[in-house]
Amino acid sequence: MKTQKYSVNQYLIETILAFVKSGEIAIPEIQRPFVWDSSKVRDLMDSLYQGYPIGYLISWKNPNVRLKDGHNAEGKKILIDGQQRVTALTAAILGQKIINKDYKRTRITISFHPLEERFEVFNTAIAKDSHWFPDIAVLFQAETNLFTLVNDYCSKNPEVSQELIFNRFDLLKKLITKQIGLIELDSDLDIEVVTEIFIRINSQGVVLSQADFAMSKIASNELYNGSIIRKCIDYFCHLAIAPEFYNVISEIDTEFAASEYFKKMSWLRNENDDIYDPAYTDLLRVAFTSEFNRGRLSDLVSLLSGRNFETRTFEESIAKQSFERLENGILNFINESNFKKFVMIIRSAGFVSSSLIRSQNALNFAYIVYLKLRQLNYNQAEIERYVRKWFVMSALTGRYSGSPESVFDFDIKNISSKPFQEFLQNVESAELSDAFWDFSLVQSLDTSVSSSPFFNVYLASQVRANDKGFLSRDISVSDLITHRGDIHHVFPKEYLKHNGLKRSEYNQIANYVYMQSEINIKVGSKAPKDYFMDLLKQCENGKLKYGSIDSKEELKNNLAQNCISESIYTMDVNSYEQFLIERRKLISNKIRDYYFNL
């Protein structure tokens, strides 16, 4: 029989709030934005007042760590489920301010209508209506006298019964004596078990990721800058998306604004590049993997707890060293030079728009490669070449689309233990054989999904080669992508629809090109053989109808750049399938040449 690794206890709400105030229960989300809207706080108060259950809270005890003098330091309980509910309770009952979505400290004030036994979020209409009690937090203050409160209310509303109001206020005050269940998980549970318990208990089916657990461990650690490291991660990721948030941090968090961390990320206030906008999960994963040579975030959770994997005990020295290493990894991640050079490398591979990047994990591991190779003292030219190739290879093969953690772990261990070129060649031999280029990739191009990673890599290859848009002499594919040009059809969509083809048939990657809209309008719904007849005349007499190409040599080059054979000159609907087959092969060949020349 397995030993139960958790306990289930019922506590009064006032006891839970006392635990939070004393720090016995740590709420790691306390400095992060409160994601509930005010109406949910109102509904929570109503549920408690009506006696409805509000679900279980789940806490996970930090392990007791062994100190140098042989004593144990008692671990805190971390609230891993119920953070929003407890924060709502502290806001409504204790009157504490919350941090809103703009990271500003604000109050959520809940009002109570004792006659109707109804709750509402305080507003100007309530302020003018004496029948509302404007702020229930006043009722729970230690110095509040219930009789005085009732007298004040009844003096403003002389028609109401004092006894009724007293009973209603008394009932509301007893809200904090309602019970709430707390499931307390043992400190020695593996993170996988904790995750499984969380998923099974959580009625909303919310999945808490291992990054969430790691962030909870970081924030609840007071010895090794946990709170400020947590803020560093959150603020960097928010600034990367919203540079104007810089001034908000300066105003609302003066302590952090005075820290070295803030100075090291201040460059983001003028940064608008959106090629790489990491979420906290991305930053944590890259910092951890590049610094610890491990790919599983469950290992980070254990290390931050001080886990000795050999003795299966918890030691303060391991926790201390792990926090120091993680901090170093984070600082390397947010370093302006590192970040900008990495983004420059991705751009140099032809990925000039975030729309071309569909795998965040491919981007994450490419940054890991960059940071790791710098750490291993590779020269800059080698780093650039290897990062470009690794990123494109990952995108083409979907390397991190399945179980990214296990692949991250495999890859970082190989990069750390052998020359990168040797490992890359091994991966290329396994993943990018002739069979991949001649068959697998060609087959993968048989799709109508324009956001396909294969099509995106093809477009990146065009950008890198400075190819021109279809039938354009001066406007490049890069121009069309970055200025939000449109993807059009070589065989016009209306032409194929008119000839009975279905959407999945005319919307094929191999029929897509970046093309100036004005040229596309001129092409209209003509068969290729018809509009190319006009184009050939245009190249003979110089009278422009479609774009600016006025010589057969230019036309030939443009077709080659767009992976279209000259057989297009005579093609109509009967040749469409042949055209798709030919073009898929040409696109695959172009991508192969592009990859091996990165």
Image (cartoon, grey):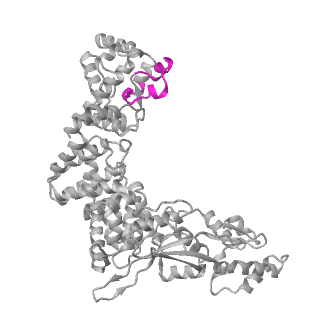
For the image shown, how many numbered marks are present on the structure? 0
Left or right position of 156 against 307 = right
Asked which quadrant contains residue 220, the reply is: bottom left
Left or right position of 88 against 564 = right
Up-down relation of residue 342 to residue 444 (above or below): below
Up-down relation of residue 454 to residue 81 (above or below): above
Q: Horizontal and vertical percent for residue 511?
A: 38, 26
Asked which quadrant contains residue 118, the reply is: bottom right
State the residue at coordinates (30%, 68%). Answer: 326
Left or right position of 491 against 413 = right
State the residue at coordinates (43%, 16%). Answer: 526
Asked which quadrant contains residue 306, the reply is: bottom left
Tell me, yes or no, if residue 33 can be seen here.
yes
Q: Quadrant of the C terminus?
A: top left
Tell me, yes or no, if residue 95 can be seen here.
no
Q: Horizontal and vertical percent for residue 9?
A: 56, 79
Q: Please identify the residue farthest to the front as the structure is shown.
A: 1
Q: Horizontal and vertical percent for residue 502?
A: 49, 25
Q: Which residues are magenta?
A: 491-518
Q: Nearer the viewer, residue 476 or 81?
A: 81
Q: Horizontal and vertical percent for residue 309?
A: 29, 72
Q: Nearer the viewer, residue 322 or 241?
A: 322
State the residue at coordinates (59%, 69%). Answer: 55
Q: Nearer the viewer, residue 215 or 380?
A: 215
Q: Is residue 516 magenta?
A: yes
Q: Is residue 242 magenta?
A: no
Up-down relation of residue 407 to residue 462 (above or below): below
